[in-house]
Image (tube, rainbow, N blue to C red):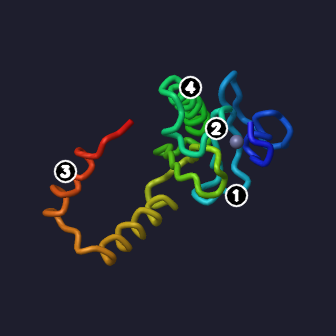
Amino acid sequence: MHDDCPFCKIVMGEMKVREIYRDNNTVAFVDNLPRFAQGQCVVIHRRHVEQFYELEDREIAELFGAVKQVAKKLKKAYDPQFVSVFSRGQTVPHAHIIVFPSQPMGTMDGFLKSLYFAYQLGSKSGESNLDETAKLIKDAEGH
Ligand SMILES: [Zn+2]
């Protein structure tokens, strides 16, 4: 629990949100600033870590169990073709997974297209670079 963390306050019930799911370890709520789609939700584990990969394996399973529950709710509520997940962790330094309904030709496609073009412009990347990429990642030591 971090006193100045809004997501910890949500876990403790000290900050009001539009909660849509809660179990012993996780909380999910409707995002106040939906950027991807209507119905965008945020899923958090109650333990405060900045990045999701800092959670223990068991906690990861708990977090993604909740993501699954939320995804099923979104599928039922909006009947989108896809339910997408996104995680970066810039806005609030408490690991969170964003879950949102996604349609073909929706926001997500525009987002992905813009990423693709930005990446192509910014790099000399081609098929040959993928071998280097694979080697770099494969050889990097994880913990
Ligand atoms: Zn927190």
4 or 1: mark nearer the eye: 4
Q: Is mark 2 within 8 Å of ligand 1?
A: yes
The answer for how far apart the CA atoms under marks 2 and 4 are is 10 Å
If you read the primary sequence from the N terminus, does the residue marked by circle 4 or circle 3 appear first? 4
Q: Position of residue 92 (x, y in %)?
A: 66, 52
> Which numbered mark, 1 or 2, is in the foreground of this view?
2
Q: Position of residue 59 (x, y in %)?
A: 55, 27
Q: Judging from the image, what secondary structure is the residue with disc 3 in?
A: helix
Task: Report whether 99 appears left or right of 126.
Answer: right
Measured in 3D between alpha carbons, the distance from the residue under mark 4 to the one under mark 1, in whole angstroms, is: 25 Å
- Disc 1 marks which residue? 33
Element under label 1? Answer: loop
Q: Are marks 4 and 3 in contact (CB under 8 Å)?
A: no
What residue is shown with label 2? 44
In this rendering, the answer to whether 125 lies above or below 99 is below
Q: Rounded to the nearest whole Å, what is the CA distance between mark 3 and mark 2?
A: 33 Å
Tell which circle, 3 or 2, labels the residue nearer the N-terminal end: 2
Circle 1 packing at 10 Å, graded few (<14), some (14-19), many (20+), is: few
**Quadrant the C terminus occupies:** top left
The three-letter code of the residue at mark 4 reads Glu
Instruction: Check disc 4 and report the residue beneath it.
Output: 62
**Disc 3 residue crowd, few under 14, some 14–19, many 20+, Cα 10 Å:** few
Q: Position of residue 29 (x, y in %)?
A: 71, 41
Question: Which of labels 3 and 2 is toward the front?
Answer: 3
Amino acid type assigned to the residue bearing label 3 in the image: Lys
Q: Position of residue 20 (x, y in %)?
A: 72, 35
Amino acid type, callout 1:
Leu
| Closer to viewer: mark 4 or mark 3 | 3
Which callout, 1 or 3, points at the residue further toward the start of the chain? Answer: 1
Question: Residue at horizontal 40%, vertical 67%?
Answer: 115
Q: Earlier in the sequence, mark 1 or mark 2?
A: 1
Q: Residue at x 21, y 51 (%)?
A: 134
